[in-house]
Amino acid sequence: MIDVPYRDVRTPLPHSNRPVSEARSSRIAQFVIPSSIRSATEHTLRHLVVVLLLAAVVHSTLVAHAESGSPAIETKLPPLVSEMRDRLLAAVAAGHIEDLREPLEWNEMPFMFRDASDGDSSADPIAYWKSTSADGSGKDILADIGRMLALPPAKLAIGRDAENNAVYVWPYLSERPLDRLSAAEEKDLLSLMPATAAESLRASKKWSWWRLVIGADGTWHALKRAGAP
């Protein structure tokens, strides 16, 4: 065993006239965080910021766009976003909601499909969609996805991350002031739902239908009905 000389940690280092606090600060300042740990920490923090901002988008807690201006409608999608959209549309065309599982599994972050307060938010999204669908197989939800993706999305900025600085939200109408829709926007709304449901949305001035969110990096982040159980 190696004997380590005892020194009272309350005393400054030998040959140093600096106070203890300065000596400790100097030693701390000289500590270098390994690049691998620093990179992992920055990656985790970026993911946390994205999760929080996405939650704000999906749960409609952002500042009202009526005050700051509605976000831009994006007619030309980035290649990765377009690729994910095509994959979702392929599942819609096939009529099998299980075909959505592969795009779901590409997401490293929790997929948003229901409120955490409504139960186990880690449950299988596909099983949940089947259980809440009209026919028990999810075909009506696939049809809703197809109608949403036939319209352009709204583009929302969510930060300065070079790889994921925006999200694309379908339908774009979910980010518009519902009581001030143009004639063309009202037509688009009626392509999504029956007239009675569209009128109810306009009267409430609050979006309470589906939102589908894809990140700028092509990650599918959310498919959630506002106020869904």
Image (cartoon, grey):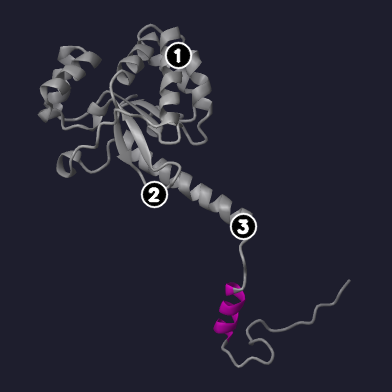
Q: Which mark is residue 91?
A: 1
The three-letter code of the residue at mark 1 reads: Ala
The three-letter code of the residue at mark 2 reads: Arg
Magenta segment: does it hold 183? Answer: no
Judge whether residue 95 can be spotted in this image: no
Q: Where 89 sits versus 123, above or below? A: above
197 on left or right of 31: left
Say which label, 3 or 2, has the lower sequence index. 3
Q: Which mark is residue 184?
A: none
The three-letter code of the residue at mark 3 reads: Ser
Residue 193 in the image, given as x and y percentages of width and height = 23, 14
Identify residue for label 2.
Answer: 160
Give the magenta part as a residue range: 20-29
Identify residue for label 3.
Answer: 35
Q: At x 43% / y 41%, what residue is drawn?
A: 164
Q: At x 40% / y 29%, what residue is drawn?
A: 222
Rounded to the nearest whole Å, what is the CA distance between mark 1 and mark 3? 41 Å
Rounded to the nearest whole Å, what is the CA distance between mark 2 and mark 1? 32 Å
Using the rendered view, name the quadrant where residue 150 is placed: top left
Q: Quadrant of the C terminus?
A: top left
